[in-house]
Amino acid sequence: MNQGEYYCTHYFWDDEDREYILCATWFFEKNYPTEPNLWHLTALEVEEQEPGSPDLDVTILGKYNVWLYVENEGPSFMDLAEVDHVS
């Protein structure tokens, strides 16, 4: 895997069980073999939400702490797409 930016999809449900589809941008920091490789969440946005549902605050200060939820979940390797890599 190349060092650089990657996109992947995450899913979030609020207290009313409304689904939000999120696009996360991750930065992969390649450190192996001297240290473990690291993933850093750098951006998060709502791509889709159910009609009539309130806008979701994806910042770390939002009601649901969506940023922390996605950060703890980590990147989804099923649909990970490379955006840009660092040589």
Image: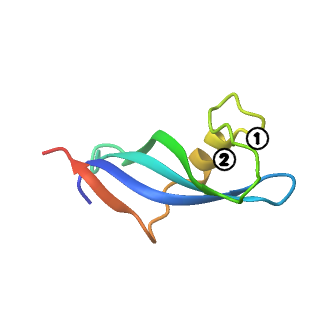
**Does the CB distance between marks 2 and 1 fall below 8 Å?**
yes
> Against 72, is 63 above or below?
above
- The residues tagged by marks 2 and 1 sit, at their Cα atoms, a distance apart of 8 Å
Give the total number of marks visible in the rendering. Answer: 2
Residue 64 shows which numbered tag? 1
Residue at the limit of the structure toward the right, as seen here:
16
| Nearer to the camera, 80 or 34 | 80
Q: Residue at x 48, y 56 (%)?
A: 75
Using residue 36 as the reference point, say whether residue 52 is left or right of it.
right
Foreground tag (2 vs 1):
1
Using residue 4 as the reference point, say whether residue 67 is left or right of it.
right
Sequence-earlier tag: 2 or 1: 1
Q: How is the image coloured?
A: rainbow
Which quadrant of the view contains residue 54? top right
Q: Residue at x 40, y 63 (%)?
A: 80
Residue bearing mark 2: 69
Q: Secondary structure at mark 1?
A: loop
- Image quarter where the N terminus lies is bottom left
Which quadrant of the view contains residue 16? bottom right
Residue at the limit of the structure toward the bottom, as seen here:
78
Query: x, y percentage for residue 62?
Result: 71, 32
| Nearer to the camera, 46 or 68 | 46
Query: x, y percentage for residue 27?
Result: 36, 44
Q: Residue at x 51, y 60 (%)?
A: 9
Disc 2 crowd rating (10 Å Cα; few below 14, some 14-19, many 20+) is: some
- Image quarter where the C terminus lies is top left
Using residue 38 as the reference point, say whether residue 4 is left or right of it.
left
Q: Amino acid at mark 1?
A: Tyr
